[in-house]
Image: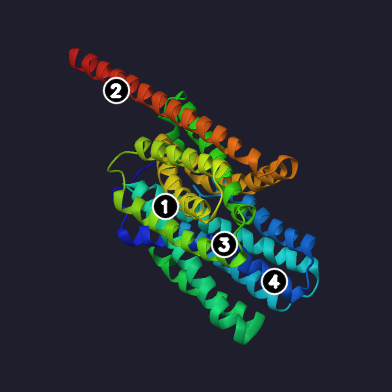
Amino acid sequence: MICSSKLSNRAIISACVLAAAGALVFNAFPLFLSNIADRFNFNDEELGLLGTAFLGGVAFISLTAVIWLPRLNWRAVSLASYVLIGCGFMSLGWVESATSVYIAMALFGVGSGAIFTLGTTIAGSASDPDRAFGFKLGTEMIIASLLVFVMTAFIVKQFGFAGFLVGGGILYGLTALVIPFVPDNLLANIEQEEESVPKAGGVAAWLAVLALFIQFGAFSGLWGFMERIGSANGLDADTIGTILSISLLVGLAAALLGAALGNRFGQIRPLMVSFAMTLGLALLLSSTQGVVAFAVAACGVSGLIQFYLIYKMGFIVSLDASGKFTILLAFILSLSGAIGPGVVGAVVEESGFAAVYPLVIGVTLLSAILTLLADKKARRFSSQLLIARSEEQTTGESA
C-alpha cells in the first residue's frame, strides 16, 4: 500500500469517523433491524431480507471500489455517500410497502459501504497503519455504543420510530462534518505503482487475505452465537446480557491497546498471540461450562476480534503495494462476516456446539500457517528485491 507520511492527523480522524459511520448499522444491527421491523410489522423472514438488502448494498459498492476509488475525488464520494444514506434512511419515514423498505435499505447499504471502504483505505495509507486501524476500530465501537445507549435509554422510549429516524439522522449529520478533512485521492497513481511491483509479491498478499477471510469468519460465527453458547452453558438471559455488555468494553479496550502499541512489536508477533489465545478460548469452551468460562470466552472473543483485525489488516497493507487488497478489505470482511455465522449455524444444527470448537481450532491453525507463509514469502521477495537493486547500482557505478 502507498503509505503517506504526509497524511495529517485530521485526515486520519476523518478516516476513523467515516469508517465508524459506515459500520454503524452493522455494529448496531439489533437496534436498526428491530426498530424498522416493528414499524412495518415484519416477520422473521422479512427481517432477514431487510439485513440482506443492506448487506447486499454494502457488498456491491465495496466489491466495485477497485474501479471507482482510485479515480474519483474522495470528498465528492463522501458527500454523495451521505446523500444516499440520507435518502435511504430518512425515506423509511414515509414509504409503506416492503419492497420500498428493501430498496431504501439497499441505498443505505451502498452509502454506508462507500464511506466505510473509503475510511479503511485512508487509514491503510497512514505511515503507521496498525495504529490508524486501532483508532478506527475504537471509534467504530464508541460511536455504535453511544448510539445504542442513547436510543434505547431515551429517544425510542419517548419518541418512537420518528425519534429513531431523527436521532440517527442527526448522528450521521455530525459525522459528515469531517468531509472537508478527507484527502482528494491517495490512489491516483495506483496503476503506475502496481507496474513497479514484482508479480510474485502478490502471492503473499493473497495468502494473508485468505487467512483474514477464514479467521474473521470463525470469529464472526462464534460472536454471532455467543448468546446461544451462554444458554447452552446454563446461564440465564440477564447474566448473558451483562457479560456481553462487559465484553463490548473489552473489545473497545483491545482496539485502543492496538492503537497505543501500533507497530512497536511488528505484526506477526501480535497475530501469533491472537491465534494462541483463540486456540485457548476454543479449548476452554469445549472442556468447561459455567459462568466463568462463558465470561472469559465472550470477553476474549470480543477483544480478539478487534486486536486481530488491527494487525491482520496492517499486515495486508504492508504486503499490498498496488493498494487493491486494501480497497477490498471492506468487501472481504462483509463477505466473511456473512458466511461465518451461516457455517457455524449449520454445524450447530447438525452436531451441536461440541463440533464448533474443533472447527474453530482447525481454522485458527490454518490461518496461522497461511500468515506465516505469507510473511516468509514477503521476506524472501524483499531480500531478492534488495539484491537486485544492489546489483543494478553496482553495475551502474561500474559503467
- Of callouts 1 and 2, which one flags the residue occurring earlier in the amino acid sequence? 1
CA gap between label 2 and label 4 equals 57 Å
Find residue 304 and report its horizontal and vertical position in percent. Answer: 45, 48
- Of callouts 4 and 1, which one flags the residue occurring earlier in the amino acid sequence? 4
Label 1 amino acid? Ile
CA gap between label 4 and label 3 equals 25 Å
Q: Which residue is mark 4?
A: 36
Label 4 amino acid? Ile
Find residue 373 and report its horizontal and vertical position in percent. Answer: 45, 25
Q: Residues within 10 Å of mark 1 (few under 14, many from 20)?
A: many
92 to 332, vertically: above or below: below
- Circles 2, 3 touching at the beta carbon (< 8 Å): no
Find residue 383 and report its horizontal and vertical position in percent. Answer: 32, 21
Return the mark for residue 122: 1
Left or right: residue 48 compared with residue 390: right
Q: Which residue is mark 2?
A: 386
Which quadrant is the C terminus positioned in? top left
Q: Secondary structure at mark 3?
A: helix
Q: Residue furthest left?
A: 397
- Of callouts 2 and 3, which one flags the residue occurring earlier in the amino acid sequence? 3
Q: Secondary structure at mark 4?
A: helix
Mark 4 or 3: the one toward you? 3
Label 2 amino acid? Leu
